[in-house]
Amino acid sequence: MILLNITGHTVEKLVDPFGMLSGDRYEFFLNLKVDEEDELYSEKGVGLRVLFVADNGEMKISNYHFYEEETEEVLDFELEEDEERLVFDYCKDHLEE
């Protein structure tokens, strides 16, 4: 289990230049503090990129991946159900920034 400690973020509303997609899409880059004992830990820092969709009052995580902050290398880890809920709630709460 990965213990998520979100320490900050950046968010950007993505533009659909052709107007083909319904709703709004946001790209979150979450800064994570990971314990040295955790298998996800990297001295180069770990982040979580989240594609978040808001469409007609419904919100969801469309996609996500962990990455090494210094190199931007994608890390092969998945969120557990409770962790995904934590990330969803965090993104929802910080959507309008």
Image (spheres, rainbow, N blue to C red):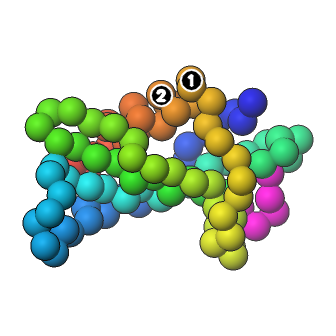
- The kind of secondary structure element at disc 1 is helix
Q: Tag 1: Cα neighbours inside 10 Å, few (<14), some, or many (≥20)? A: few
Q: Which residues are magenta?
A: 41-45
Q: Are marks 2 and 1 in contact (CB under 8 Å)?
A: yes
**Up-down relation of residue 94 to residue 72 (above or below):** above
Q: Is residue 30 visible?
A: no
Residue 50 pos. (x, y %): 45, 52
Point out the image quarter for the N terminus: top right
Residue 45 visible at all: yes
- Residue displayed at 80% across by 59% down: 42
Query: Which of the labelled discs sits on residue 82, or is there none?
Result: 1
- Mark 2 residue element: helix
Residue displayed at 14% across by 63% down: 20
Residue 58 lies, in percent from the top left, at: 21, 33
Instruction: Considering the whole magenta stretch, tell me its main secondary structure.
Output: loop
| 63 is within the stretch colored magenta | no
Q: Report whether 84 appears left or right of 71.
A: left
Q: Position of residue 3 (x, y in %)?
A: 69, 33
Marking on residue 85: 2
Q: Is residue 15 above or below residue 97?
A: below
Q: Nearer the viewer, residue 91 or 58?
A: 58
